[in-house]
Image (tube, coloured by chain):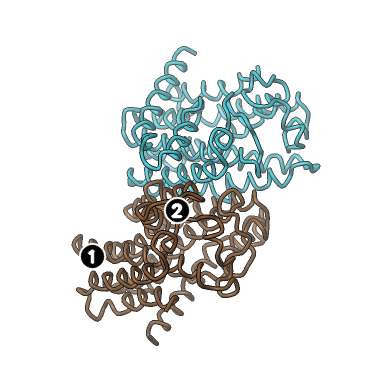
Chain colours: A cyan, B brown
Amino acid sequence: MDKLKEFIKKTVDITDQTLQEVLPSDTTYPDSIHKLMRYSMFAGGKRIRPCLLIAAYEACGGSVDDKQVQLTSAAVEMLHTFSLIHDDLPCMDDDDYRRGKLTAHKAFNEALAVLGGDALCIGAFEILSRTARVDIIREIATALGTQGMIGGQVVDIESEGKTVTREIVEYIHNNKTAALICSSVRIGAMLANASEPDLQKFTSFGNKIGLAFQVVDDILDEESTTEQLGKDAGSDRERGKATFPAVVGIEESKKYARKLIDDAWNDIAFLNDKGKILHDLAEYIITRIS
Amino acid sequence: MDKLKEFIKKTVDITDQTLQEVLPSDTTYPDSIHKLMRYSMFAGGKRIRPCLLIAAYEACGGSVDDKQVQLTSAAVEMLHTFSLIHDDLPCMDDDDYRRGKLTAHKAFNEALAVLGGDALCIGAFEILSRTARVDIIREIATALGTQGMIGGQVVDIESEGKTVTREIVEYIHNNKTAALICSSVRIGAMLANASEPDLQKFTSFGNKIGLAFQVVDDILDEESTTEQLGKDAGSDRERGKATFPAVVGIEESKKYARKLIDDAWNDIAFLNDKGKILHDLAEYIITRIS
């Protein structure tokens, strides 16, 4: 896995450097919101989505040194962070900590967290417009909308404390989490102008690892300590969240995550050696619980 | 003003029809958020921004029958509505009524209002991507960002209850309100491929009427009854909001609004007869107080 570590380090460095360049400095007026945006963007995120985007791009012959893929990855990470800031708000999941640091509305205040999330969302579309790829803008806006991420968040919140079916949990996870992860993979392939048949395979791969990612997250919430997680452990169960362990149990959840990753590998087998990093990234997602 | 009335009616009809087409139906799953989005989009807005956008487009030779201008106008109105929904939240202006109807978080709930605002913002960019004009996407994202509308909202909230200078009030109004109004005018001209020198004149016109619009709003908040406004009258003063009447008085504010409109007319004098509707729209903004 040494090549993977090297790839992740390089991707994180380039994404962080791009974010440093595109985000207004924290002394730019009005400075409070720029401080919040930078606080949230540099709060220790693992940059999984940029990693997947760039890995798919490179698997199709692109290079991380291309400015277009760097800007797009930074925008995707901004959109992910926007969703986390709003998700943590008191009226939503009401979380005080994320990755061991105070959430935006606790470190600053609620109004600024709403506006800071909005600004990251809008700023991401401004950055995407610089790449002149309207197909990418349409792709990401669709993945984030009410038939994607936001739709998943709505059902997630409305399912709290209710007895839900496995079908509902799959809907939530597929939309709230997998939609943006899958879209990251797809965008990497689209930027490299992958063929439609290949894009279908990347889509199938992306959907599976996106779902696996959230199943693993559910398991971690049950099995880890608060210190390990950097946020309150067991909070899903406490709040009556719709999770995989809640509907099928821990063991079945683990088996399901493993199967999703194995199946995902099959989807990208056609890439042969060029798919090595994507393959290892998928495994990296699941090793968090094994 | 009969031609103006006719123009406004046609624009409102076409904008509403376009919104009906692009917004998911309120039985589309998850239906709660689609209900909220439609509730807020059809809550009696005057569609000032689509009117200005289409008037500028037609002044440059375009026609309201073009699909591109219809989609763009609908997207701009969605972005405006997104900003209102978030602005009304308890952690922001905490308003219960707007245009005589319950605000989104009162009619539904706070979490859904945050997500519904987000979805209108994201949905607007999806619709803009269909027009394949990245220059328009960049224009609107810049107008809405922290160096535009969001920046104005931040300073507005942070100035509450403080003694502020006229300079600060101008900053808030220029960004919170004028940025999107000016951008609507600019986008109309840009869609019609106006020349750079003409675009500069539209920009100057748009900035002035945008500022005048908010000065008039400040005056109305002081002078109207709650019934006339459809929201709490006098609430700006009660909350210690940074307004024009608060820093220069009512009479001076009225004079200033009048002067801004007169100056704005000069900016578009070059349009001659083709600028008639834009001219009348500017007057329409100020007649609300005269």
Amino acid beneath label 1 = Lys
Q: Nearer the viewer, residue A229 or B268?
A: B268
Query: Which of marks 1 and 2 precedes in the sequence?
Result: 2
Q: List x then y, in percent, for residue A249.
A: 78, 28
The residue under label 2 is: B125
Chain to which mark 1 belongs: B
How far apart marks 2 and 1 lie (CA) works out to: 27 Å
Q: Looking at the picture, how far across and down is residue A147, in whole percent?
A: 58, 50
Question: Residue A96: x and y, percent?
Answer: 63, 32
Q: In which quadrant will I find the C terminus of chain A?
A: top right
**Residue B133 percent coordinates (x, y):** 34, 56
The residue lying furthest to the bottom in this view is: B2
Residue A220 in the image: above or below residue A138: above
Residue B232 falls in image quadrant: bottom right
Label 2 secondary element = helix
Which class describes the residues within 10 Å of circle 1: few (<14), some (14-19), or many (20+)? Answer: some
In this orientation, which residue lies closer to the viewer: B77 or B176? B176
Secondary structure beneath label 1: helix
Whether residue B49 is visible to the viewer of this picture, yes or no, is no
Answer left or right for B144 relative to A159: left
Image point 41% across, 24% down: which residue? A11
Q: Are marks 2 and 1 on the same chain?
A: yes
Q: Residue furthest top?
A: A2
Report the residue marked by disc 1.
Answer: B201
Q: Quadrant of residue B192?
A: bottom left
Residue depicted at x 51% and y 37%: A80
Give me the disc on residue A33.
Answer: none
Q: Residues within 10 Å of mark 2 (few under 14, many from 20)?
A: many
Q: Nearer the viewer, residue A134 or B121?
A: B121
| Chain containing the residue with disc 2 | B
Image height of B16 relative to A100, above or below: below
